Image (cartoon, helix red, strand yellow):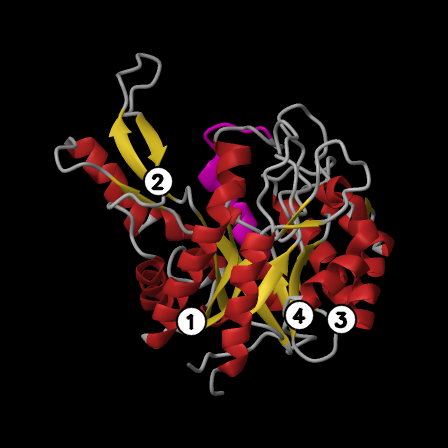
Amino acid sequence: MSRPFHFASFLMGGFEACFARNEHGARIDMLRSTRHDEYCREDYRLLKDTGIFTVRESLSWHQIDRGNGQYDFSRFERIMQTAREEGMQVIWSLNHFDIPDDTDPFSPAFVERFTSYALEAARTIRRYTEGTMYLIPINEISFFSWFAAEIGVWAPYAHNRGFEFKVQLTRCVIDFIRRLRLTDPDVRFVHADPYMHRFCLPDADHATRQFVHDFNENDLFQAWDIVSGRMMPELGGQPDFLDVVGIHYYVYNQELVREAKPDPAHPLPRFKFKALELDDPLRMNFDEILKVVYDRYRKPLAITETGSFGILRVPWWERIFRETDRAIEQGIPVLGICSYPVIDRPDWHDGHLTNSGFWDFEAGDATCRRIPHEGVLQVVRQYTGERKSDPA
């Protein structure tokens, strides 16, 4: 079967790089926690041996931006140089849940501060990149705005300001794209956001059914809609800003919604959410999800994050490969699938290992020695082998 193929490999590997300030006030640094910043060459060679030649990496805005227009990219330039030496194509995220401590994310100055940083980041990445450069301006705008500004778990620790923060982040993206294209036209922007789908039971009350409908038809698309100008066109979004729609999709991204017991402290209806099991008959197939997104935007798609945990990894990847191929057979332009993370990572909140990669490492092992998960790697190697045998 032929596939649209704009990346160096259809299967990609993503390295967890969250840089948020968490609920305890501490900075997360997943590059350090997994020692990928130290082992990037070895990690790239593991991936190449598996048929993966495209990776996702992320910059840390707060580490790079020293204020007053001063930037230090040295930590990340080592990764850029290694990728170039190893022949690895990198899709760079410029922001991964990360804002400098001296910024007010709700102020007008925030947009200019981000754009100045992002333009300098693009210029730096360009020095190590030949041909088309792929950038994710801000990773997971929808999740970031909800987690950090709606329920206040991460910095900026705001409550009930999620949509306001989402608009600010999309302003940043739009301003950055507009200005970078004036100087570097050979850039493609990947806009990576979670795809969630919610269900309710047939006997659900009106409020629950309306909540589920509004979310599935409108709310989950807001960041993509604003960047593409479908929503709030006064912000300057345009359809051609949405080069690639990046979809993040995990086993818990389909949920059953039920009405919760009334809470006097919350006058609006509150709901309970339960992730659907992998074999739940309510679940949409992934090819159906890809069709929903493609029909809305008519843009190339990339699965920029997917994966599962523990013993679910093998059935998950078998299903993702099968249903992605089914979408491609229907003419949906899927450019690639990214395992995220491709190397295991500690949980954001309690630090336990999630057993979610193609390679694990043992708890308490300060060296983070990579341990292959042979079951999932067998599935991956079979899939990449079949890809090579497909007609172009």
What amino acid is at disc 2?
Glu
**Element on which disc 2 rests:** loop
Q: Which of marks 4 and 1 is nearer the N terminus?
A: 4
Q: Which mark is residue 126?
A: 3
Q: How far separated are the C-alphas under marks 4 and 1?
A: 23 Å
| Mark 3 nearby-residue class (10 Å; few <14, some 14–19, many ≥20) | some
Q: Which of marks 3 and 4 is nearer the N terminus?
A: 4
- Nearest the viewer among 83 and 295 is 83
- Mark 2 lies on residue: 277
Q: Which region of the structure is painted magenta?
A: 157-172
Q: Earlier in the sequence, mark 1 or mark 2?
A: 2
Is the residue under label 1 in contact with that under label 4 (CB below 8 Å)? no
137 up-or-down from 159: above or below? below
- Nearest the viewer among 347 and 353 is 353
What amino acid is at disc 3?
Arg
Which numbered disc, 1 or 2, marks the residue closer to the eye? 2
Across and down, in percent, residue 363 comes to: 70, 33
| Mark 1 nearby-residue class (10 Å; few <14, some 14–19, many ≥20) | some
